[in-house]
Image (cartoon, rainbow, N blue to C red):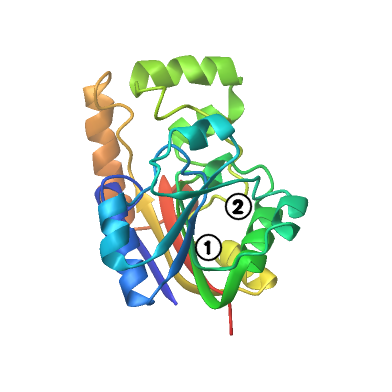
Amino acid sequence: MLIEFRNKKAFPGWELAPQFLSNLITSYKIKNVLEIGSGANPTLDAETILSLGINYTTNDLSAEELKKAPKEFATWKADLCNSEDIKNHSKKYDLIFSRMVNEHIENGEQYYKNIFHLLEPGGITAHCFSTLYAFPFLVNRILPENLSDKLLDIFNPRDRHQHEKFPAYYSWSRGPSKKSIKKFQSIGFEVIEYVGYFGHSYYRKRLPFLHSLEQRKANYLVKNPISSLTSYAHVILKKPK
């Protein structure tokens, strides 16, 4: 089990995601991939999928989001927290992946149980997500949705067609800790890798002085980690054969 803490610059949930996912696919000899919540924006493009020789399904709660997906991808409209949706789905996967989705899951325990059910024996699941107690995400959790939505437009404006904002609950979205590891193990997973990341960029454009302080804090915490103060994390779990 690899437990580490790193600077947010190394977080594989954004620009580094395609390489991170490709490495997982080649390292574990993956053939069937399900990406959760990726409807409009699958992490890998069609050319990469063809070169890797894999079957790739993009999932989302929203039919509208899935309509935005490139036509080369198989699609599955389902709520991964809904056990009925899972029971009615016969396909199994070697790899189930998500990025910047898990913080929007209301029931983390049921979500991971359903993922466990969807995996082939020996399959893996990997997730990149924000964690609750970094200040911007704590604010996002506490404030009413309409107010947090306005703050996001100020500090991190985005293309709403391709990157809509969804409610965040942060259930099971925490940095590496003994408690979190035991939760995953209680479902039956083997924890392969659990990495926490310190720092964020929400102050960079509007509050450069605070951004500078945030980067200093992040560098300090990498050397003196406090799990509850991570901003992001990624976890790799394995379903035993």
In front of the other: 51 or 213 = 51
User: Residue 137: where, in percent of width, then height?
Assistant: 48, 34
Residue 224 lies, with reference to residue 93, above or below; the image says above
Q: Marks 1 and 2: CB-CB under 8 Å?
A: no
For label 1, the SS is loop
1 or 2: tag closer to the N-terminus: 2
Residue found at the far bottom of this picture? 241
- Quadrant holding the C terminus: bottom right
User: Residue 147: where, in percent of width, then height?
Assistant: 54, 15
Residue 217 lies, with reference to residue 142, above or below; the image says below
Q: Indicate left or right for 78 with 148 as reference.
A: right
The residue located at (30%, 48%) in the rendering is 8
Amino acid type for the residue under numbered disc 1? Ser
> What is the CA distance from the residue labelled 1 to the residue labelled 2?
11 Å
Q: How many other residues sit within 10 Å of disc 1, few (<14), some (14-19) or many (≥20)?
A: some
In the rendered image, which residue does mark 1 sit on?
177
Kindly report which numbered mark, 1 or 2, lies closer to the viewer in this rendering.
2
The residue located at (58%, 34%) in the rendering is 62
Residue 36 lies, with reference to residue 126, above or below; the image says above
The residue located at (58%, 30%) in the rendering is 167
In front of the other: 117 or 104 = 117
In the rendered image, which residue does mark 2 sit on?
172
Residue 16 seen anywhere in this rendered image of the structure: yes
The residue located at (67%, 67%) in the rendering is 117
Residue found at the far front of this picture? 71
Q: Indicate left or right for 168 with 31 as reference.
A: right
For label 2, the SS is loop
